[in-house]
Protein backbone atom coordinates (compact mmCIF):
# COMPACT_ATOMS: atom_id res chain seq x y z
CA UNK A 1 0.00 0.00 0.00
CA UNK A 2 1.22 3.53 -0.75
CA UNK A 3 -0.04 7.08 -0.52
CA UNK A 4 1.25 8.13 -3.94
CA UNK A 5 0.37 6.62 -7.32
CA UNK A 6 3.98 5.89 -8.19
CA UNK A 7 4.27 3.67 -5.11
CA UNK A 8 7.41 5.54 -4.10
CA UNK A 9 6.60 5.21 -0.40
CA UNK A 10 5.06 1.74 -0.56
CA UNK A 11 5.00 -0.51 2.48
CA UNK A 12 4.22 -4.23 2.45
CA UNK A 13 0.90 -5.03 4.07
CA UNK A 14 0.88 -8.76 3.81
CA UNK A 15 2.75 -11.71 2.36
CA UNK A 16 1.00 -15.08 2.36
CA UNK A 17 -1.83 -17.28 1.13
CA UNK A 18 -4.96 -15.61 2.57
CA UNK A 19 -7.52 -14.38 0.08
CA UNK A 20 -8.65 -11.29 2.00
CA UNK A 21 -7.10 -8.62 4.20
CA UNK A 22 -8.81 -6.22 6.57
CA UNK A 23 -7.70 -2.57 6.53
CA UNK A 24 -8.83 -0.01 9.08
CA UNK A 25 -7.90 3.13 10.97
CA UNK A 26 -6.70 5.16 7.99
CA UNK A 27 -7.00 8.93 7.95
CA UNK A 28 -8.77 10.81 5.14
CA UNK A 29 -6.98 10.47 1.82
CA UNK A 30 -6.37 8.28 -1.20
CA UNK A 31 -4.40 5.08 -0.86
CA UNK A 32 -2.99 2.89 -3.61
CA UNK A 33 -2.84 -0.86 -3.32
CA UNK A 34 -1.32 -3.41 -5.64
CA UNK A 35 -1.14 -7.18 -5.57
CA UNK A 36 1.83 -9.24 -6.70
CA UNK A 37 2.19 -13.03 -7.03
CA UNK A 38 5.25 -14.96 -5.89
CA UNK A 39 6.68 -15.05 -9.40
CA UNK A 40 6.31 -11.33 -9.96
CA UNK A 41 3.02 -11.04 -11.89
CA UNK A 42 1.32 -7.80 -10.84
CA UNK A 43 -2.33 -6.73 -10.86
CA UNK A 44 -3.55 -3.25 -11.75
CA UNK A 45 -3.35 -0.88 -8.81
CA UNK A 46 -6.46 -0.30 -6.72
CA UNK A 47 -7.32 3.15 -5.41
CA UNK A 48 -8.82 3.23 -1.92
CA UNK A 49 -10.57 6.49 -1.09
CA UNK A 50 -10.93 7.11 2.61
CA UNK A 51 -13.41 9.81 3.54
CA UNK A 52 -14.48 9.98 7.16
CA UNK A 53 -18.04 10.91 8.14
CA UNK A 54 -18.74 14.53 8.90
CA UNK A 55 -17.29 15.45 12.27
CA UNK A 56 -19.82 18.25 12.69
CA UNK A 57 -22.74 15.89 12.21
CA UNK A 58 -21.13 13.45 14.61
CA UNK A 59 -20.73 16.09 17.30
CA UNK A 60 -24.31 17.32 16.94
CA UNK A 61 -25.58 13.77 17.29
CA UNK A 62 -23.35 13.31 20.31
CA UNK A 63 -24.85 16.43 21.85
CA UNK A 64 -28.39 15.16 21.26
CA UNK A 65 -27.38 11.81 22.66
CA UNK A 66 -25.90 13.39 25.76
CA UNK A 67 -29.06 15.39 26.39
CA UNK A 68 -31.34 12.36 26.04
CA UNK A 69 -29.06 10.21 28.21
CA UNK A 70 -28.80 12.81 30.96
CA UNK A 71 -32.58 13.17 30.90
CA UNK A 72 -32.96 9.41 31.34
CA UNK A 73 -30.50 9.31 34.24
CA UNK A 74 -32.16 12.31 35.86
CA UNK A 75 -35.62 10.77 35.63
CA UNK A 76 -34.46 7.53 37.21
CA UNK A 77 -32.41 9.10 39.98
CA UNK A 78 -35.17 11.57 40.77
CA UNK A 79 -37.49 8.61 41.20
CA UNK A 80 -41.09 8.87 42.30
CA UNK A 81 -42.27 12.10 43.87
CA UNK A 82 -45.98 12.00 44.59
CA UNK A 83 -46.15 9.00 46.90
CA UNK B 1 -13.70 -16.11 7.41
CA UNK B 2 -11.52 -19.08 8.25
CA UNK B 3 -8.63 -19.33 5.87
CA UNK B 4 -7.66 -22.89 5.23
CA UNK B 5 -7.46 -25.04 8.33
CA UNK B 6 -9.29 -24.11 11.50
CA UNK B 7 -7.40 -23.24 14.63
CA UNK B 8 -8.25 -26.28 16.74
CA UNK B 9 -8.60 -29.85 15.54
CA UNK B 10 -12.29 -30.81 15.24
CA UNK B 11 -11.79 -33.66 17.67
CA UNK B 12 -10.54 -31.24 20.33
CA UNK B 13 -13.55 -29.04 19.69
CA UNK B 14 -15.95 -31.97 20.02
CA UNK B 15 -14.33 -33.12 23.26
CA UNK B 16 -14.57 -29.65 24.81
CA UNK B 17 -18.16 -29.33 23.61
CA UNK B 18 -19.04 -32.71 25.07
CA UNK B 19 -17.40 -32.03 28.43
CA UNK B 20 -19.16 -28.74 29.00
CA UNK B 21 -22.46 -30.02 27.65
CA UNK B 22 -22.45 -32.84 30.17
CA UNK B 23 -21.59 -30.37 32.93
CA UNK B 24 -24.35 -27.87 32.12
CA UNK B 25 -27.03 -30.52 31.53
CA UNK B 26 -26.05 -32.38 34.68
CA UNK B 27 -26.31 -29.21 36.75
CA UNK B 28 -29.59 -28.31 35.05
CA UNK B 29 -31.15 -31.64 35.98
CA UNK B 30 -29.76 -31.48 39.53
CA UNK B 31 -30.93 -27.94 40.23
CA UNK B 32 -34.23 -28.53 38.44
CA UNK B 33 -35.26 -30.94 41.18
CA UNK B 34 -36.17 -28.05 43.47
CA UNK B 35 -38.72 -26.66 40.98
CA UNK B 36 -42.33 -27.66 41.57
CA UNK B 37 -44.40 -24.71 40.44
CA UNK B 38 -44.25 -22.10 37.71
CA UNK B 39 -42.94 -19.65 40.31
CA UNK B 40 -40.04 -21.99 41.12
CA UNK B 41 -39.32 -22.63 37.46
CA UNK B 42 -39.60 -19.05 36.22
CA UNK B 43 -38.39 -17.10 39.23
CA UNK B 44 -36.24 -19.56 41.25
CA UNK B 45 -38.53 -19.08 44.23
CA UNK B 46 -37.93 -15.29 44.35
CA UNK B 47 -34.98 -15.74 46.72
CA UNK B 48 -31.84 -15.47 44.60
CA UNK B 49 -28.95 -14.03 46.62
CA UNK B 50 -26.38 -11.33 45.88
CA UNK B 51 -23.53 -13.50 44.55
CA UNK B 52 -25.61 -15.44 42.05
CA UNK B 53 -27.66 -12.35 41.30
CA UNK B 54 -24.66 -10.23 40.40
CA UNK B 55 -23.04 -12.92 38.32
CA UNK B 56 -26.13 -13.62 36.27
CA UNK B 57 -26.67 -9.93 35.55
CA UNK B 58 -23.14 -9.74 34.19
CA UNK B 59 -23.09 -13.12 32.43
CA UNK B 60 -26.31 -12.63 30.55
CA UNK B 61 -25.07 -9.31 29.23
CA UNK B 62 -21.74 -10.84 28.22
CA UNK B 63 -22.70 -12.40 24.96
CA UNK B 64 -20.47 -13.76 22.23
CA UNK B 65 -20.87 -10.24 20.88
CA UNK B 66 -18.95 -8.96 23.85
CA UNK B 67 -16.05 -11.34 23.54
CA UNK B 68 -15.86 -11.42 19.76
CA UNK B 69 -17.24 -8.01 18.84
CA UNK B 70 -15.12 -6.06 21.32
CA UNK B 71 -11.90 -6.83 19.45
CA UNK B 72 -13.67 -6.13 16.18
CA UNK B 73 -14.88 -2.74 17.44
CA UNK B 74 -11.39 -1.91 18.62
CA UNK B 75 -9.98 -2.71 15.20
CA UNK B 76 -12.69 -0.75 13.36
CA UNK B 77 -13.34 2.19 15.66
CA UNK B 78 -10.21 2.25 17.78
CA UNK B 79 -9.95 3.42 21.37
CA UNK B 80 -13.32 5.17 21.19
CA UNK B 81 -14.82 1.93 19.90
CA UNK B 82 -13.82 0.09 23.06
CA UNK B 83 -14.85 2.92 25.37
CA UNK B 84 -18.20 3.31 23.59
CA UNK B 85 -18.85 -0.40 23.98
CA UNK B 86 -18.18 -0.13 27.71
CA UNK B 87 -21.18 2.22 28.00
CA UNK B 88 -23.43 -0.80 27.49
CA UNK B 89 -22.85 -1.42 31.21
CA UNK B 90 -24.92 1.70 31.92
CA UNK B 91 -28.00 -0.38 31.21
CA UNK B 92 -27.19 -2.54 34.21
CA UNK B 93 -26.25 0.42 36.42
CA UNK B 94 -29.44 2.31 35.64
CA UNK B 95 -31.64 -0.76 35.96
CA UNK B 96 -30.37 -1.21 39.52
CA UNK B 97 -32.69 1.38 41.12
CA UNK B 98 -35.46 0.31 38.74
CA UNK B 99 -35.16 -3.30 39.92
CA UNK B 100 -35.87 -2.28 43.47
CA UNK B 101 -38.81 -0.15 42.37
CA UNK B 102 -40.24 -3.00 40.26
CA UNK B 103 -40.04 -5.44 43.14
CA UNK B 104 -41.72 -2.95 45.46
CA UNK B 105 -44.56 -2.07 43.10
CA UNK B 106 -45.21 -5.61 41.85
CA UNK B 107 -44.48 -8.15 44.58
CA UNK B 108 -46.37 -10.85 42.68
CA UNK B 109 -45.28 -9.88 39.21
CA UNK B 110 -43.80 -12.30 36.72
CA UNK B 111 -42.90 -10.42 33.57
CA UNK B 112 -42.35 -7.01 32.02
CA UNK B 113 -45.50 -7.82 30.07
CA UNK B 114 -47.45 -7.87 33.33
CA UNK B 115 -46.20 -4.32 33.92
CA UNK B 116 -47.32 -3.03 30.52
CA UNK B 117 -50.71 -4.73 30.83
CA UNK B 118 -51.45 -3.35 34.28
CA UNK B 119 -49.88 0.06 33.82
CA UNK B 120 -51.02 0.99 30.35
CA UNK B 121 -53.72 -1.44 29.24
CA UNK B 122 -54.14 -3.94 26.45
CA UNK B 123 -53.21 -1.62 23.58
CA UNK B 124 -49.76 -0.77 24.90
CA UNK B 125 -49.34 -4.36 26.05
CA UNK B 126 -49.89 -5.67 22.50
CA UNK B 127 -47.38 -3.26 21.03
CA UNK B 128 -44.92 -4.19 23.76
CA UNK B 129 -45.34 -7.90 23.08
CA UNK B 130 -44.74 -7.34 19.38
CA UNK B 131 -41.58 -5.31 19.97
CA UNK B 132 -40.13 -7.54 22.65
CA UNK B 133 -40.77 -10.80 20.83
CA UNK B 134 -39.17 -9.39 17.69
CA UNK B 135 -36.13 -8.32 19.67
CA UNK B 136 -35.87 -11.49 21.75
CA UNK B 137 -36.27 -13.85 18.84
CA UNK B 138 -33.77 -12.01 16.65
CA UNK B 139 -31.29 -11.95 19.55
CA UNK B 140 -31.81 -15.66 20.10
CA UNK B 141 -31.37 -16.42 16.41
CA UNK B 142 -28.26 -14.25 16.12
CA UNK B 143 -26.68 -15.97 19.14
CA UNK B 144 -27.40 -19.45 17.84
CA UNK B 145 -26.02 -18.55 14.41
CA UNK B 146 -22.95 -16.97 15.98
CA UNK B 147 -22.41 -20.18 17.94
CA UNK B 148 -22.41 -22.32 14.84
CA UNK B 149 -20.19 -19.91 12.93
CA UNK B 150 -17.69 -19.51 15.74
CA UNK B 151 -17.37 -23.20 16.53
CA UNK B 152 -16.81 -23.79 12.84
CA UNK B 153 -14.19 -21.06 12.58
CA UNK B 154 -12.39 -22.17 15.72
CA UNK B 155 -12.44 -25.93 15.31
CA UNK B 156 -13.86 -26.87 11.94
CA UNK B 157 -16.97 -28.43 13.47
CA UNK B 158 -19.61 -28.07 10.71
CA UNK B 159 -21.93 -25.09 11.22
CA UNK B 160 -25.15 -27.09 11.46
CA UNK B 161 -23.69 -29.47 14.03
CA UNK B 162 -22.16 -26.75 16.18
CA UNK B 163 -25.30 -24.63 16.13
CA UNK B 164 -27.53 -27.61 16.86
CA UNK B 165 -25.45 -28.86 19.78
CA UNK B 166 -25.25 -25.46 21.48
CA UNK B 167 -28.98 -24.92 21.10
CA UNK B 168 -29.86 -28.43 22.19
CA UNK B 169 -27.70 -28.22 25.32
CA UNK B 170 -29.14 -24.86 26.32
CA UNK B 171 -32.71 -25.98 25.66
CA UNK B 172 -32.27 -29.14 27.71
CA UNK B 173 -30.81 -27.61 30.83
CA UNK B 174 -33.14 -24.60 30.68
CA UNK B 175 -36.17 -26.86 30.25
CA UNK B 176 -35.14 -29.11 33.10
CA UNK B 177 -33.80 -26.53 35.49
CA UNK B 178 -35.64 -23.29 34.77
CA UNK B 179 -34.26 -19.97 35.94
CA UNK B 180 -32.36 -21.62 38.78
CA UNK B 181 -30.30 -23.65 36.30
CA UNK B 182 -29.77 -20.58 34.15
CA UNK B 183 -28.56 -18.53 37.10
CA UNK B 184 -26.44 -21.28 38.59
CA UNK B 185 -24.64 -22.02 35.33
CA UNK B 186 -24.28 -18.27 34.74
CA UNK B 187 -22.16 -17.99 37.88
CA UNK B 188 -19.73 -20.64 36.71
CA UNK B 189 -19.70 -19.22 33.19
CA UNK B 190 -18.99 -15.69 34.48
CA UNK B 191 -15.96 -16.84 36.42
CA UNK B 192 -14.63 -18.80 33.44
CA UNK B 193 -15.12 -15.84 31.11
CA UNK B 194 -13.52 -13.25 33.40
CA UNK B 195 -10.57 -15.43 34.41
CA UNK B 196 -10.10 -16.40 30.77
CA UNK B 197 -10.03 -12.78 29.63
CA UNK B 198 -7.52 -11.85 32.34
CA UNK B 199 -5.19 -14.73 31.51
CA UNK B 200 -5.36 -14.08 27.78
CA UNK B 201 -4.89 -10.35 28.29
CA UNK B 202 -1.77 -10.71 30.42
CA UNK B 203 -0.40 -13.37 28.11
CA UNK B 204 -0.72 -10.97 25.18
CA UNK B 205 0.95 -8.20 27.20
CA UNK B 206 3.88 -10.47 28.00
CA UNK B 207 4.66 -10.46 24.29
CA UNK B 208 4.26 -6.78 23.52
CA UNK B 209 4.25 -3.46 25.39
CA UNK B 210 1.58 -0.80 25.16
CA UNK B 211 4.16 1.64 23.81
CA UNK B 212 4.84 -0.73 20.93
CA UNK B 213 1.12 -1.03 20.24
CA UNK B 214 0.72 2.73 20.31
CA UNK B 215 3.65 3.34 17.97
CA UNK B 216 2.41 0.72 15.54
CA UNK B 217 -1.10 2.15 15.50
CA UNK B 218 0.21 5.67 14.98
CA UNK B 219 2.10 4.46 11.95
CA UNK B 220 -0.34 2.00 10.36
CA UNK B 221 -3.82 2.79 11.72
CA UNK B 222 -3.67 6.36 13.01
CA UNK B 223 -7.41 7.00 13.00
CA UNK B 224 -7.85 4.37 15.70
CA UNK B 225 -6.03 6.66 18.11
CA UNK B 226 -8.02 9.70 17.11
CA UNK B 227 -10.21 11.39 19.70
CA UNK B 228 -12.27 13.00 16.94
CA UNK B 229 -13.12 9.87 14.97
CA UNK B 230 -16.57 10.72 13.54
CA UNK B 231 -17.96 7.19 13.12
CA UNK B 232 -16.94 6.29 16.66
CA UNK B 233 -18.41 9.45 18.17
CA UNK B 234 -21.73 8.86 16.44
CA UNK B 235 -21.85 5.32 17.70
CA UNK B 236 -21.39 6.21 21.37
CA UNK B 237 -24.80 7.45 22.39
CA UNK B 238 -26.67 5.43 19.82
CA UNK B 239 -25.23 2.23 21.25
CA UNK B 240 -25.68 3.45 24.81
CA UNK B 241 -29.38 4.06 24.23
CA UNK B 242 -29.79 0.78 22.33
CA UNK B 243 -28.34 -0.90 25.42
CA UNK B 244 -30.64 0.97 27.80
CA UNK B 245 -33.64 0.03 25.69
CA UNK B 246 -32.61 -3.62 25.69
CA UNK B 247 -32.17 -3.85 29.45
CA UNK B 248 -35.10 -1.67 30.50
CA UNK B 249 -37.76 -3.50 28.52
CA UNK B 250 -36.77 -7.12 28.26
CA UNK B 251 -38.11 -9.89 30.45
CA UNK B 252 -34.59 -11.30 30.75
CA UNK B 253 -33.90 -8.47 33.24
CA UNK B 254 -37.38 -8.05 34.71
CA UNK B 255 -37.54 -11.76 35.56
CA UNK B 256 -34.36 -11.30 37.55
CA UNK B 257 -35.79 -8.28 39.34
CA UNK B 258 -38.69 -10.53 40.38
CA UNK B 259 -36.43 -13.49 41.18
CA UNK B 260 -33.92 -11.81 43.47
CA UNK B 261 -34.30 -11.93 47.22
CA UNK B 262 -35.77 -8.74 48.70
CA UNK B 263 -33.27 -5.92 48.85
CA UNK B 264 -30.79 -7.70 46.59
CA UNK B 265 -31.94 -6.44 43.20
CA UNK B 266 -30.40 -3.00 43.26
CA UNK B 267 -27.03 -4.17 44.54
CA UNK B 268 -26.90 -7.17 42.21
CA UNK B 269 -27.49 -5.15 39.06
CA UNK B 270 -25.02 -2.50 40.18
CA UNK B 271 -22.33 -5.08 40.87
CA UNK B 272 -23.23 -6.76 37.59
CA UNK B 273 -22.57 -3.46 35.85
CA UNK B 274 -19.23 -3.12 37.62
CA UNK B 275 -18.25 -6.60 36.50
CA UNK B 276 -19.26 -5.94 32.90
CA UNK B 277 -17.78 -2.45 32.55
CA UNK B 278 -14.09 -3.32 31.94
CA UNK B 279 -14.71 -6.24 29.63
CA UNK B 280 -14.90 -4.42 26.28
CA UNK B 281 -11.45 -2.94 26.92
CA UNK B 282 -9.95 -6.06 28.51
CA UNK B 283 -11.17 -8.28 25.68
CA UNK B 284 -10.99 -5.68 22.91
CA UNK B 285 -7.47 -4.33 23.17
CA UNK B 286 -5.94 -7.57 21.91
CA UNK B 287 -7.12 -6.65 18.42
CA UNK B 288 -4.83 -3.63 18.48
CA UNK B 289 -1.88 -5.96 18.83
CA UNK B 290 -2.42 -7.52 15.41
CA UNK B 291 -0.16 -4.98 13.68
CA UNK B 292 2.75 -5.27 16.08
CA UNK B 293 2.66 -9.06 16.11
CA UNK B 294 2.17 -9.19 12.37
CA UNK B 295 -0.99 -11.24 12.57
CA UNK B 296 -2.78 -10.95 9.24
CA UNK B 297 -6.50 -10.32 9.62
CA UNK B 298 -8.61 -11.57 6.70
CA UNK B 299 -11.85 -10.38 8.25
CA UNK B 300 -12.53 -8.10 11.21
CA UNK B 301 -14.71 -10.53 13.11
CA UNK B 302 -11.89 -13.06 13.54
CA UNK B 303 -9.25 -10.69 14.88
CA UNK B 304 -9.75 -11.74 18.53
CA UNK B 305 -9.15 -15.46 18.09
CA UNK B 306 -6.37 -14.91 15.54
CA UNK B 307 -4.33 -12.74 17.91
CA UNK B 308 -4.88 -15.07 20.86
CA UNK B 309 -3.78 -18.08 18.88
CA UNK B 310 -0.66 -16.36 17.59
CA UNK B 311 0.35 -15.56 21.17
CA UNK B 312 -0.80 -18.65 23.03
CA UNK B 313 -0.97 -21.34 20.37
CA UNK B 314 -3.33 -24.24 20.93
CA UNK B 315 -3.83 -23.37 24.61
CA UNK B 316 -5.07 -19.99 23.45
CA UNK B 317 -7.40 -21.59 20.96
CA UNK B 318 -8.85 -23.81 23.67
CA UNK B 319 -9.24 -20.79 25.96
CA UNK B 320 -11.08 -18.80 23.30
CA UNK B 321 -13.27 -21.77 22.49
CA UNK B 322 -14.28 -22.15 26.13
CA UNK B 323 -14.78 -18.42 26.71
CA UNK B 324 -16.96 -18.09 23.61
CA UNK B 325 -18.97 -21.22 24.41
CA UNK B 326 -19.63 -19.92 27.94
CA UNK B 327 -20.64 -16.48 26.78
CA UNK B 328 -23.02 -17.98 24.24
CA UNK B 329 -24.57 -20.43 26.67
CA UNK B 330 -24.99 -17.78 29.38
CA UNK B 331 -27.06 -15.63 27.05
CA UNK B 332 -28.99 -18.23 25.10
CA UNK B 333 -30.20 -19.91 28.28
CA UNK B 334 -31.42 -16.59 29.69
CA UNK B 335 -33.23 -15.72 26.50
CA UNK B 336 -34.89 -19.12 26.30
CA UNK B 337 -36.01 -18.94 29.93
CA UNK B 338 -37.23 -15.35 29.92
CA UNK B 339 -39.00 -15.55 26.58
CA UNK B 340 -40.77 -18.80 27.39
CA UNK B 341 -41.82 -17.34 30.75
CA UNK B 342 -43.12 -14.25 28.98
CA UNK B 343 -45.13 -16.31 26.52
CA UNK B 344 -46.40 -18.61 29.29
CA UNK B 345 -47.48 -15.76 31.56
CA UNK B 346 -48.60 -13.11 29.09
CA UNK B 347 -50.09 -15.21 26.32
CA UNK B 348 -50.95 -18.62 27.75
CA UNK B 349 -52.03 -17.64 31.26
CA UNK B 350 -53.41 -14.14 30.73
CA UNK B 351 -55.02 -14.63 27.34
CA UNK B 352 -55.85 -18.34 27.02
CA UNK B 353 -56.02 -20.25 30.31
CA UNK B 354 -56.30 -17.93 33.34
CA UNK B 355 -57.27 -20.79 35.64
CA UNK B 356 -54.21 -22.93 34.90
CA UNK B 357 -52.56 -24.40 37.97
CA UNK B 358 -48.95 -23.56 38.89
CA UNK B 359 -47.83 -27.08 37.99
CA UNK B 360 -49.53 -26.89 34.64
CA UNK B 361 -47.94 -23.52 33.96
CA UNK B 362 -44.52 -24.98 34.69
CA UNK B 363 -45.13 -27.73 32.14
CA UNK B 364 -46.31 -25.20 29.58
CA UNK B 365 -43.20 -23.11 30.16
CA UNK B 366 -41.04 -26.15 29.54
CA UNK B 367 -42.89 -27.01 26.35
CA UNK B 368 -42.60 -23.44 25.10
CA UNK B 369 -38.85 -23.50 25.83
CA UNK B 370 -38.60 -26.53 23.59
CA UNK B 371 -40.75 -24.84 20.97
CA UNK B 372 -38.56 -21.74 20.99
CA UNK B 373 -35.50 -23.92 20.59
CA UNK B 374 -36.98 -25.72 17.60
CA UNK B 375 -38.11 -22.46 16.01
CA UNK B 376 -34.65 -20.95 16.43
CA UNK B 377 -33.02 -24.08 15.07
CA UNK B 378 -35.24 -24.06 12.01
CA UNK B 379 -34.51 -20.41 11.27
CA UNK B 380 -30.77 -20.89 11.75
CA UNK B 381 -30.34 -23.98 9.58
CA UNK B 382 -30.17 -22.16 6.22
CA UNK B 383 -27.54 -19.81 7.69
CA UNK B 384 -28.89 -16.63 6.13
CA UNK B 385 -25.97 -14.34 6.87
CA UNK B 386 -27.93 -11.12 6.90
CA UNK B 387 -30.16 -12.44 9.67
CA UNK B 388 -27.74 -11.28 12.33
CA UNK B 389 -28.09 -7.73 11.15
CA UNK B 390 -31.89 -7.92 11.53
CA UNK B 391 -31.19 -7.54 15.23
CA UNK B 392 -30.22 -3.94 14.58
CA UNK B 393 -33.75 -3.13 13.43
CA UNK B 394 -34.66 -3.69 17.07
CA UNK B 395 -32.63 -0.61 18.02
CA UNK B 396 -35.44 1.88 17.30
CA UNK B 397 -38.03 -0.49 18.78
CA UNK B 398 -36.32 -0.85 22.13
CA UNK B 399 -35.18 2.77 22.24
CA UNK B 400 -38.80 3.89 21.89
CA UNK B 401 -39.74 1.90 24.99
CA UNK B 402 -37.29 3.58 27.38
CA UNK B 403 -39.44 6.59 28.26
CA UNK B 404 -42.77 4.74 28.61
CA UNK B 405 -41.05 2.41 31.06
CA UNK B 406 -39.24 4.98 33.17
CA UNK B 407 -42.20 7.31 33.43
CA UNK B 408 -44.51 4.36 33.95
CA UNK B 409 -42.51 3.25 36.98
CA UNK B 410 -42.02 6.65 38.58
CA UNK B 411 -44.65 9.17 37.45
CA UNK B 412 -48.34 8.88 38.20
CA UNK B 413 -48.96 11.30 35.36
CA UNK B 414 -47.60 8.97 32.66
CA UNK B 415 -50.55 7.69 30.66
CA UNK B 416 -51.64 5.32 27.89
CA UNK B 417 -51.58 7.88 25.13
CA UNK B 418 -48.04 8.75 26.06
CA UNK B 419 -46.89 5.13 26.09
CA UNK B 420 -48.64 4.00 22.91
CA UNK B 421 -47.72 7.15 21.00
CA UNK B 422 -44.18 7.12 22.30
CA UNK B 423 -43.61 3.53 21.22
CA UNK B 424 -45.22 3.85 17.80
CA UNK B 425 -43.87 7.28 16.88
CA UNK B 426 -40.44 6.62 18.26
CA UNK B 427 -40.12 3.25 16.55
CA UNK B 428 -41.59 4.58 13.33
CA UNK B 429 -39.36 7.61 13.00
CA UNK B 430 -36.40 5.58 14.21
CA UNK B 431 -36.89 2.91 11.57
CA UNK B 432 -37.22 5.54 8.85
CA UNK B 433 -33.94 7.08 10.01
CA UNK B 434 -32.34 3.63 10.09
CA UNK B 435 -32.86 3.33 6.34
CA UNK B 436 -32.64 6.97 5.37
CA UNK B 437 -29.58 7.95 7.38
CA UNK B 438 -27.94 4.95 8.99
CA UNK B 439 -27.96 2.43 11.82
CA UNK B 440 -25.83 4.74 13.95
CA UNK B 441 -28.64 7.22 14.55
CA UNK B 442 -31.71 4.98 14.68
CA UNK B 443 -31.83 4.19 18.41
CA UNK B 444 -30.95 7.74 19.36
CA UNK B 445 -33.66 9.31 17.19
CA UNK B 446 -36.25 6.76 18.32
CA UNK B 447 -35.53 7.50 21.98
CA UNK B 448 -35.53 11.26 21.44
CA UNK B 449 -38.86 11.28 19.56
CA UNK B 450 -40.43 8.93 22.09
CA UNK B 451 -39.17 11.12 24.92
CA UNK B 452 -40.74 14.28 23.54
CA UNK B 453 -44.11 12.59 23.07
CA UNK B 454 -44.15 10.84 26.45
CA UNK B 455 -43.12 13.97 28.31
CA UNK B 456 -45.72 16.07 26.51
CA UNK B 457 -48.50 13.60 27.30
CA UNK B 458 -47.45 13.34 30.94
CA UNK B 459 -47.32 17.10 31.28
CA UNK B 460 -50.77 17.54 29.74
CA UNK B 461 -52.26 14.61 31.61
CA UNK B 462 -55.08 15.06 34.14
CA UNK B 463 -55.05 11.47 35.35
CA UNK B 464 -52.95 10.11 38.18
CA UNK B 465 -52.22 6.39 38.19
CA UNK B 466 -52.88 4.42 41.37
CA UNK B 467 -49.81 2.26 42.10
CA UNK B 468 -52.00 -0.35 43.79
CA UNK B 469 -53.29 -1.35 40.39
CA UNK B 470 -49.91 -3.02 39.84
CA UNK B 471 -50.35 -5.30 42.81
CA UNK B 472 -52.09 -8.16 41.15
CA UNK B 473 -52.93 -11.17 43.27
CA UNK B 474 -50.78 -14.19 42.45
CA UNK C 1 -5.89 15.05 18.98
CA UNK C 2 -5.02 11.48 19.82
CA UNK C 3 -5.22 9.16 22.78
CA UNK C 4 -1.78 8.88 24.36
CA UNK C 5 0.18 5.73 25.07
CA UNK C 6 -0.14 6.53 28.75
CA UNK C 7 -3.92 6.63 28.50
CA UNK C 8 -3.97 3.33 26.64
CA UNK C 9 -1.72 1.78 29.28
CA UNK C 10 -4.01 2.99 32.03
CA UNK C 11 -7.22 1.65 30.52
CA UNK C 12 -5.76 -1.70 29.43
CA UNK C 13 -3.98 -2.58 32.67
CA UNK C 14 -6.77 -0.99 34.64
CA UNK C 15 -9.45 -3.06 32.96
CA UNK C 16 -7.51 -6.32 33.36
CA UNK C 17 -6.89 -5.63 37.03
CA UNK C 18 -10.56 -4.69 37.48
CA UNK C 19 -11.61 -7.99 35.90
CA UNK C 20 -9.33 -9.94 38.23
CA UNK C 21 -10.80 -8.10 41.20
CA UNK C 22 -14.31 -8.79 39.95
CA UNK C 23 -13.65 -12.53 39.85
CA UNK C 24 -12.32 -12.43 43.39
CA UNK C 25 -15.25 -10.36 44.61
CA UNK C 26 -17.73 -12.82 43.13
CA UNK C 27 -16.01 -15.71 44.84
CA UNK C 28 -16.09 -13.88 48.17
CA UNK C 29 -19.76 -12.98 47.73
CA UNK C 30 -20.63 -16.59 46.99
CA UNK C 31 -18.83 -17.82 50.09
CA UNK C 32 -20.70 -15.25 52.18
CA UNK C 33 -24.03 -16.30 50.70
CA UNK C 34 -23.32 -20.00 51.17
CA UNK C 35 -22.34 -19.37 54.78
CA UNK C 36 -25.52 -17.47 55.56
CA UNK C 37 -27.72 -19.83 53.56
CA UNK C 38 -28.90 -17.06 51.26
CA UNK C 39 -27.55 -18.36 47.96
CA UNK C 40 -31.01 -18.85 46.49
Image (cartoon, coloured by chain):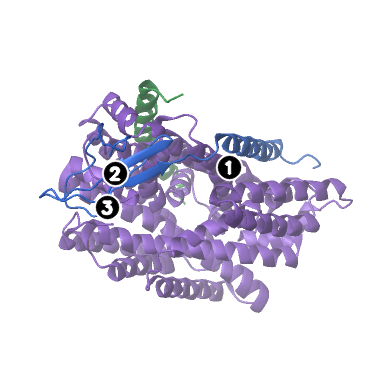
Chain colours: A blue, B purple, C green
Q: Which residue is outermost to the left?
A: A39
Labels 2, 1: front one: 2
Question: How far separated are the C-alphas under marks 2 and 3?
Answer: 13 Å
The residue that mark 1 highlights is: B96
Label 1's element?
helix
Labels 1, 3: front one: 3
Q: Callout 3: 10 Å neighbours few (<14), some, many (20+)?
A: few
The spot of residue A11 in percent (x, y) is 23, 35
**Tags 2 and 3 touching, CB below 8 Å:** no
- Residue B40 appears in the figure: no
Q: Is residue B130 above or below residue B433?
A: below
* Sequence-first tag of 2 and 3: 3
The spot of residue C32 in percent (x, y) is 42, 39
> What label sits on residue B35 in the rendered view?
none
Q: Callout 2: 10 Å neighbours few (<14), some, many (20+)?
A: many
Label 3's element?
loop
The residue that mark 2 highlights is: A33
Determine the image quadrant of residue B216.
top left
Q: Disc 2 sits on a residue from what chain?
A: A
Is B399 on the left-hand or right-hand side of B373? right
The spot of residue B287 in percent (x, y) is 31, 40
The residue that mark 3 highlights is: A20
| Marker count (numbered) | 3
Which residue is located at x 59 percent, y 41 percent? Answer: B94
Which residue is located at x 61 percent, y 77 percent? Answer: B356
Q: Disc 3 sits on a residue from what chain?
A: A
Label 2's element?
strand
Determine the image quadrant of residue B132.
bottom right
Amino acid sequence: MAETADFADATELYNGTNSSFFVSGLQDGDYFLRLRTADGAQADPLVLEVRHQSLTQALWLALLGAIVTIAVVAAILRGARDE
Amino acid sequence: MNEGSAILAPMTGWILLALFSVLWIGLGIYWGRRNKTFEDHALAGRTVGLALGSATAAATWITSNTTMLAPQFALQLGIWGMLAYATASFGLFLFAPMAGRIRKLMPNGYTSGDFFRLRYGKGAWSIFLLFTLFYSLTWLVSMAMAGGILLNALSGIPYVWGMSVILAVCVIYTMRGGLAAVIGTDFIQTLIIIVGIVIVGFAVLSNVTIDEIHTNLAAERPALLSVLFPAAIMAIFNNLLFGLGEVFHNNVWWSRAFAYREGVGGKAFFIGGLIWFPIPVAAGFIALVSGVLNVPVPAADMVGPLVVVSVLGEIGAIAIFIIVFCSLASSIDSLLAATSDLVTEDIYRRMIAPAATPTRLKKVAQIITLGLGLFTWAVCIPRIGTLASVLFFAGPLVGAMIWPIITGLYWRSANRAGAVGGMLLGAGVGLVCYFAIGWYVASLIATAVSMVWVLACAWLSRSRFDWDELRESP
Amino acid sequence: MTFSAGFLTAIVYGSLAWCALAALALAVLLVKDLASGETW
